[in-house]
Amino acid sequence: MIHLNNSEKTQLDALISHGMSYRQTNNNFAESYKEQRQSFQLKRLQLQAQILLVAGLTLIAFFLWANSQFQDKIYALKIGIVVELFILICWGLCKTSIGRRYPNLILLSLCWSVTCAVQICIALLFNNLEPRNNIWNLMFLTQATIVPVQCWIHLIAQIGTIVCYFILYILYNPILKNPSAFYIEQGLYFFWTCLICVFSVFLYERLRKKEFYARKAMELAQQKSEMLLLNILPEMIVEQLKQQYTTIANSFLEVTVLFADIVGFTELSTRTSPAKLVELLNTIFCLFDQLAERHGVEKIKTIGDAYMAVAGLPNQSNDHAPAMANMALDMQNAIAMFNQENNQSFRIRIGISTGPVVAGVIGLKKFAYDLWGDTVNTASRMESHGIAGSIQVCEETYQLLKDKYLLEKRGLIEVKGKGKMMTYILKEINLKS
């Protein structure tokens, strides 16, 4: 059994998350939308409180200037101070955990600080009651404009103002100085103001929610596209392509290239169904991909039943040869465990070479990150001229591994296109080193 490290578990979780059901995705979006709406609401509530404070100060100044009697000025000052104090408290609560947890209560408090508080103060001070529609309408319009979310809270704020007025009306039973037509007219203005405010908030929030979901769906699609691209190209190359598409070709002075081939797989294909064959090959190569992630090796491509990988690029490193040696040894162990679990007898032939290469992306369609150079050819020859079940390395790779690994000298072999080459068989890590 192959054990996954934390990095591999994270990648597996990412793949699983992309396979989530539509309902789960929508639930996550809903939570994100609520969080975004709450943050937006708190910022707008603070803005509203600041505007109300300034507006309140201007009204207090006006009443002090307009009223000639000293007693009326005192009353105006008292009402203004009470209202401004309520608004200041709401502003302060917006910055606390209470405000972050209960923004709807702050919204109601801000509204009623201007509507209900003014009505109550006037009733207490003057023992008189008139519907303050000008203040109410201004408050509801302001709130619908600045805080255009939670339409049902806006409706509660309006209903609360009406209920407060009727309770005060019952308690004080004022003598109405105006004819009933006046109150009907004021009631109609108030009704349509409330209706327009609530409906506009409803429409704005519905539009905002649709926009949020559309943006999230686009982000999810982009993430899926990028994940697919990252499965084809290295992350560094993807970033270069995203910024501006140009021919990407880089030279690397020293990397380690691996070729692996499954011995006998071609013969197996003649007596195995295509579906079963692809399933076996996919399982094996998935194990190799996990090992590549674990050892920091870049998978280049698969060709039939051959697997090609490189260490030391596109992010250059000095331990490319040991990283590739460790991966090759783990590939042998992975095949052994696969055979045991699936009642198979596969063996792999691995060839490794170290040296300079050129790496890049060519073509206009079906991008592929590939390698070119003598090092690639040598690694391929190390594999094709190797021994089944063994890891054959060239002289350059041997020099980098000999101090920490046990290698057996195979000797000179005739390599097609290269002549005679000294090769070695990688056995295991030297525990004594």
Image (cartoon, grey):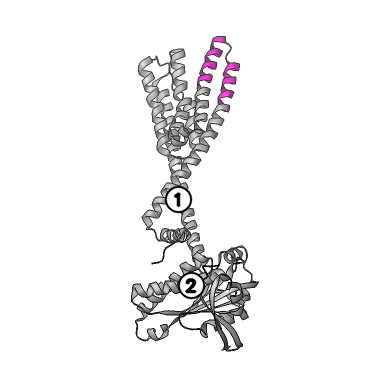
**Numbered circle sitting on residue 35:** none
Q: In terms of secondary structure, what is the magenta stretch mainly?
A: helix
Query: Spatial distance from mark 1 to mark 2, Cα to Cα?
Result: 53 Å
Q: Which residue is mark 1?
A: 210
Determine crowd level at label 2: few under 14, some 14-19, many 20+ residues with C-alpha closer than 10 A.
some
Q: Does the magenta run of residues contain 57? A: yes
Q: Which residue is mark 2?
A: 329
Q: Nearer the viewer, residue 258 or 399?
A: 399
Q: Position of residue 281 (x, y in %)?
A: 41, 76
Determine which quarter of the picture holds residue 262: bottom left
Q: Position of residue 31 (x, y in %)?
A: 42, 47
- Label 1 close to label 2 by CB (< 8 Å): no
The residue range painted magenta reads 54-82
Q: Is residue 159 above or below residue 430?
A: above
Q: Is residue 175 above or below residue 37?
A: above
Determine crowd level at label 1: few under 14, some 14-19, many 20+ residues with C-alpha closer than 10 A.
few
Check disc 1 and give the amino acid type: Lys
Determine which quarter of the picture holds residue 160: top left
Q: Residue at x 34, y 74 (%)?
A: 342
Check disc 2 and give the amino acid type: Leu
Q: Does the magenta run of residues contain 86? A: no
Q: Nearer the viewer, residue 338 or 157?
A: 338
Q: Nearer the viewer, residue 124 or 348?
A: 348
Determine which quarter of the picture holds residue 333: bottom left
**One can see residue 282 in this view:** no
Q: Position of residue 271 (x, y in %)?
A: 34, 85
92 to the left or right of 359: left
1 vs 2, front mark: 2
Q: Residue at x 52, y 16 (%)?
A: 78
Which quadrant is the N terminus positioned in?
bottom left
Q: Is residue 387 above or below residue 405?
A: below
